[in-house]
Image: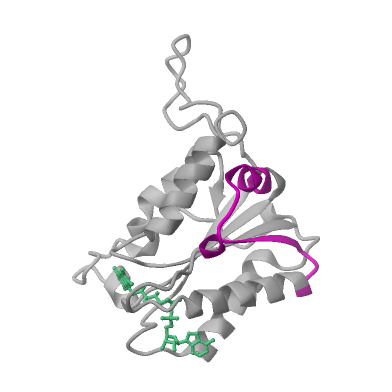
Amino acid sequence: MKILLINGGKPFAHSGGELNNTFHAVAVEALTERDHRIHETVIEQGYDVDAEVQKFLWADVIVYQMPGWWMGTPWSVKRYIDEVFTAGHGSLYANDGRSRHDPSKQYGGGGLLQGRRYMLSLTWNAPREAFDEADNFFEGRGVDGVYFPFHKSQQFVGLEGLPTFIANDVMKMPDVERHTAEYREHLDRVFGQAETPVAEARGSLTV
Ligand SMILES: Cc1cc2nc3c(=O)[nH]c(=O)nc-3n(C[C@H](O)[C@H](O)[C@H](O)COP(=O)(O)OP(=O)(O)OC[C@H]3O[C@@H](n4cnc5c(N)ncnc54)[C@H](O)[C@@H]3O)c2cc1C
């Protein structure tokens, strides 16, 4: 399988970016060991927008590694998506999906990356309960509910979600050994061996 690994880790304030670099490195190692072909983008090191569009066209799966900042995506990753997806007009997406001639065509159906997938790998200070419990901060919406607009941005270009990985409590109770072991297991479950078609990956995302 051809996998684009995007590292959105960034040193800023109390985020050192190292944990995201660590997860990115785990993915590089684990997926290469299993004979997947990978391309990497480390947003913090800079990138060429047109080359990124080509990487999206090359990939079967795109993995976003990033921290949660102010309840969502860091601005550096949002900027990357704004730049790359906008440059991808005509290759990543055709239009907004609607048609003056066919009213049955709905907004959001103009993506050109059908049949390909994406996956989120996230680091948060918030504990898991904050996402999952009805009487907790995110009102039981779960991590994918919190990332709803991000998921929609991917689906707009035709991508389909794979199960999200999240490492919680990474500041108050960092347990890098456990989290990296859990991430390896997640990657194994989702990707398996290179010859396993991604369509057979265990579970897919419902937002
Ligand atoms: C602007 C801003 C807004 C934020 N908003 C939110 C928010 O809304 N909700 C929320 O939950 N969190 C929030 N955070 C916290 C943020 O999610 C975490 O700081 C981030 O996920 C940590 O990832 P990192 O890669 O920067 O980790 P780092 O800061 O690099 O590391 C985190 C911990 O892991 C240790 N570590 C890292 N790598 C290794 C390694 N290889 N081996 C051993 N130990 C290691 C570090 O020493 C440190 O103790 C915010 C942070 C910022 C800066």
Q: Seen in the image, is 70 located left or right of residue 148?
A: left
Whether 197 is drawn above or below 152: the answer is: below
* Residue in view at x 46 percent, y 53 percent: 206
Q: Quick one: 156 or 56, which is closer to the camera?
A: 56
Question: Ligand 1: which quarter?
Answer: bottom left
* Residue in view at x 46 percent, y 75 percent: 17
Residue 57, given in percent of the width and then of the height, sits at 67, 43
Whether 156 is drawn above or below 71: the answer is: above
Q: Quick one: 33 or 185, which is closer to the camera?
A: 33
Q: Seen in the image, is 181 located left or right of residue 18?
A: right
Colour scheme employed for the rendering of this structure: one colour
Q: Magenta region: which residues?
A: 33-56
Q: Is residue 50 visible?
A: yes
**Residue most extreme to the left:** 135
Q: Looking at the image, how many numbered discs can be counted on the residues? A: 0
Q: Quadrant location of the N terminus?
A: bottom right
Residue 38, given in percent of the width and then of the height, sits at 72, 61
Residue 14, given in percent of the width and then of the height, sits at 33, 79
In magenta stretch: residue 41: yes
* Residue in view at x 57 percent, y 54 percent: 118
- Where is residue 71, by image quadrant? bottom left
Residue 162, given in percent of the width and then of the height, sits at 55, 57
Q: Quick one: 88 or 179, which is closer to the camera?
A: 88
Q: Is residue 207 visible?
A: no
Q: Quick one: 107 or 174, which is closer to the camera?
A: 174
* Residue in view at x 34 percent, y 60 percent: 72
In magenta stretch: residue 28: no
